[in-house]
Amino acid sequence: MPAPKKALRRSLTVTAAALTALALLSPAALAAPGPSASPSATPPASMSTVGGARLGRPGTQVDLAGGAPVLPKDLTARSWIVADAESGDVLAAHNAHWRLAPASTLKMLFADTLLPKWPKTTKHKVEVSDLAGIGAGSSLVGIKEEETYTVHDLWLGVFLRSGNDAVHVLSAMNGGVDKTVADMNAHAEELQALDTTVASPDGYDMPGQVSSAYDLTLFARSGLQKKDFREYASTVRAKFPGETTKDKKGKTSRKPFEIQNTNRLLAGDYDVEVYPGIAGVKNGNTTNAGSTFTGVAERDGRVLLVTVMNPAKDDHNEVYKETARLFDWGFKASGKARPVGQLVPPRSAAAASPSAGSSGEAGGTGKGTGGTKPVAGATAPGGSSGVGVAAGITAGVLVLLAGGVFLINRKWPLPDLVRRRTRP
């Protein structure tokens, strides 16, 4: 479920015609109705201390020693976090462990859990039962029953259009929604994302379904270890298979249609510019969650993760505007502000010695590991000549990606192993 709330919030700044057409698919119209109120009106007096004691305190946590710039004054989100994707240092946070409805940012956990299960080329014919149980008003990519799609197609639908129909088809391939929910909860526990309870794999508002800015950042950091995850998260536009039709002569055809990423810092909008160095990750919006977003960006050799949950200010694209301001602050503060916490490694990585880290990457091979060759600059999915892959990423990030050094070269993001370049 994409982040914006109003009718124009799916507008895509590609052409005036596209803007007009996509306005009809407003996330406000597609947003899932909230079955219950938010978990609480104010943050708890004490929260989880995973990652450090200060992260369990309500309010803003930051240490501006060392000449770091002051935080932006116009932040209205209920919860947010700025972290170094490589070292795991949390540079600043606001109610980082407040358990809130996550909306479609939860799809990062879904993807991180299921991406290793099938090769991209795996084909699946959609059955009627695969699309059962999709919540009313869900965002959809347009999957049709009795049509065949590749796993690659389905993941494009998940990441670009936040398609709950694609999530449910992949869940069916995984043994059903209940099994997928159980798998996601188990993976969240492995990642030490203990604020998270999954009730629906697509992020649709469900009683008891919660996560936190801290946990969503862990999901993004883990997912970005996977080559396929990075590819899908940074794809701006792609071709998606349409419905099979038959002409008067009985000849069948299946024309693809274009889908575009609803992450406005990646694709842009009339009031939001593409953020320099952006490389994903995922947005969301529901009645219960409001707007949520986790992004990753690089500047001057630093890679930051920012998560923003539910801005109180109801301006158009506000979640992206606040994220951009936090990115700007984070890049200026890197190396100056003292960390107020850490992004913890997964349980299995924490238990292993540093020398036990794998140099492989999980993701989309059907074997749990994949090559380390990066994806930026590759031909865009669906044959769109490369313009759709990481089109909003600056040349500097493209160089990092093309050199095979984006983020980390290890399976798990242990803080002492998180390096884009191999040390001598």
Image (cartoon, rainbow, N blue to C red):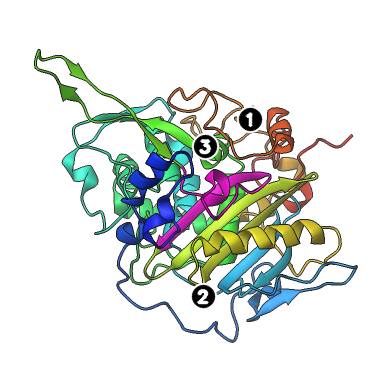
For the residue marked with disc 2, what is the amino acid?
Answer: Ala
Magenta range is: 261-285
Whichever of callouts 2 and 1 sits on the residue coming sooner in the sequence is: 2
Task: Using residue 158 as the reference point, say whether residue 416 is left or right of it.
Answer: right
**Residue 94 location, quadrant:** bottom right
Pick whichever, 35 or 388, lies toward us. Answer: 388
234 sits to left or right of 277: left
Task: Give the quadrant of the C terminus.
Answer: top right
Against 94, residue 44 (above or below) is: below
Figure check: 109 above or below 198? above
- Label 2 sits on residue: 312
Callouts 2 and 1 close, C-beta under 8 Å: no
Residue 252 versus residue 73: which sits nearer the camera? Answer: 73
Q: Give the residue drawn at x 61%, y 68%.
A: 80
Are dots 3 and 1 in contact, CB under 8 Å?
Answer: no
Confirm whether the magenta stretch covers residue 275. Answer: yes
- Label 3's element? loop
Residue tagged by mark 1? 374
Which of disc 3 and disc 2 is earlier in sequence?
3
Crowd tier of the residue under label 3, counting other residues whose Cα lies within 10 Å: few below 14, some 14–19, many 20 or above: many
- At label 3, the amino acid type is Thr
- Check disc 1 and give the amino acid type: Pro
- Distance between mark 2 and mark 1 Cα atoms: 37 Å
Residue 253 showing in the rendered view: yes
Q: Secondary structure at mark 2?
A: loop
| Marking on residue 117 | none
* Image spot of residue 122 (x, y percent): 37, 27
Q: Is residue 404 above or below residue 263?
A: above
Residue under label 3: 235
Measuring 71% from the left and 46% from the top, which residue is drawn there?
A: 298
Eye-nearest disc, 2 or 1: 2
